[in-house]
Image (cartoon, helix red, strand yellow):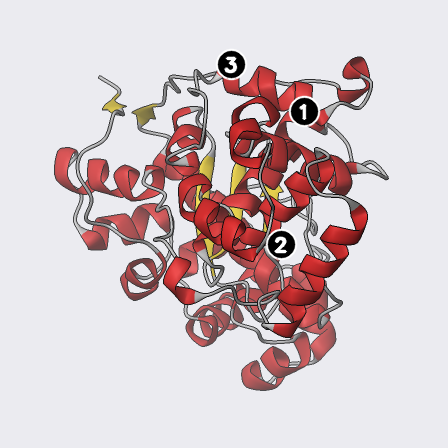
Amino acid sequence: MTDVLNGELLRVARQYRGIDGKDLADALSVDPATISRAENGVSQPADAMIARAAEKLGFPREFFFLNDRLQGLPLSAHPMWRRRKSVAQRTMDQVLADFNIRILHLRRLLGSLEFEPKLPIPRYEIDDYDGDAEKVAELVRRSWNIPRGPIANLTEIVETAGIFVFHVDLEEADIDGATIWPPGLPPCVFLNKSLSADRMRFTLAHEIGHIILHRFPAEDMETEANRFAGALLVPKADVHNDFAGQRIDLRTLARLKPEWRVAMQSLLYRASELGYVDKARAQYLWKQFNINRWKLREPPELDFEQERPILVPRLFDLHINDLGYTLDEMQNVLCMFAQDLTKIYELNLPKPGLRVVS
């Protein structure tokens, strides 16, 4: 912590609350340029103004003096968005501010613990495999000791590899997921908590594809990540007996969905991609999805529960139950008021496979 205002954190706090610079300036009875200069580090505001800003934004004063160096938007690594349409800039700013704050918390939560992932994070250059996402997915399953067939809990495997998964409110931003790998921290995957369980699993697999395949943004990276996700969740060799020698129809897809824990639509994509369904038959089935209005919402009787991430709740559990922190003390460590922390995070889960540094 420094004696100088961190203007980037003033901006993050403002955007997190969904307040623009002019509204904050009006609330503080200052010129908008004063807010802009403070956020850009051009000027150091008076202590009285900082105190009023902290009160208005609902953050402890200490938050604005942390020495975390944020890389600006889009954060300290290239987020890999899966966006369906453009959204308001204020909404995007708010989402990215949320990610920044969670990363700030994660850095502090890991500071007093020894974090030892039990699985590696493999990295592959897809060009080394002639663009074959199927082969890369096979290597990843071997690296993570995933048995043949459907993956029972993808989130558990991902977290065992030390990748942090966050369920976040991204509905207004119309985003399924994003991946950020901050310097000095494990990769962080942010998932839209309003997604159905099947769509969330595919989104997580897609984001893992980015982590494993993409060091830098690339033109075809979304397609590559989609192909990787499909191959990871529904491997060609393992699904053969379910697809071969039988008629692929809606009834078949509905039967296979609970087993493979992916959407009927994902199964149809895989069946088409692997040559078990010809183009005419696939077009007919997609029309049936449209007629039944299943493209946005598949039959609810086929739903299954979302996979719940446990690493971050376990970090809180360790601090509170093993290290003896009170919620007020957690508030001081994370520089966020207790009511916000309890709203954002789940705090009551079993003790983890993490240990305190002696």
Q: Nearer the viewer's eye, disc 2 or disc 3? A: 3
Say which of marks 2 and 1 sits in front.
1
Q: Which of marks 1 and 3 is nearer the N terminus?
A: 1
Label pair 2/1, CB-CB below 8 angstroms: no
| Image-quadrant location for residue 310 | top left
Task: Tell which circle, 2 or 3, labels the residue nearer the N-terminal end.
Answer: 2
In screen coordinates, is 320 left or right of 195? left
x and y percentages locating residue 335 in the rendered image: 38, 53
Disc 3 designates what residue?
A: 142
Residue at disc 3, secondary structure: helix
Residue for point 23% across, 24% down? 356
Vertical placement of residue 75 versus 169, above or below: above
Looking at the image, which residue is at 67% across and 24% down?
Answer: 134
Q: Residues within 10 Å of mark 3 (few under 14, many from 20)?
A: few
Residue marked by disc 1: 134
Q: Is residue 319 left or right of residue 287?
A: left
Q: Disc 2 designates what residue?
A: 8
Are the two marked residues, 2 and 3, in contact with CB atoms closer than 8 angstroms?
Answer: no
Q: How far apart are marks 1 and 3 (CA)?
A: 13 Å
Q: Which of 198 and 220 is in front in this view?
A: 198
Quadrant position of residue 27: bottom right
Q: Relative to residue 12, is residue 201 depicted above or below? A: above
Q: Is residue 170 above or below residue 270?
A: below
Gap between marks 2 and 1 measured at Cα: 42 Å
SS at mark 2 in the image: helix
Choose the circle earlier in sequence order: 2 or 1: 2
Residue at the (42%, 45%) spot, across then down: 105
Q: Position of residue 1 (x, y in %)?
A: 46, 42
- Report the amino acid beneath label 1: Glu
* Dot 2 alpha-carbon crowd within 10 angstroms: few under 14, some 14 to 19, many 20 or more: many
Where's residue 112, x and y in %?
31, 28
| Residue 322 drawn above or below residue 294 | above
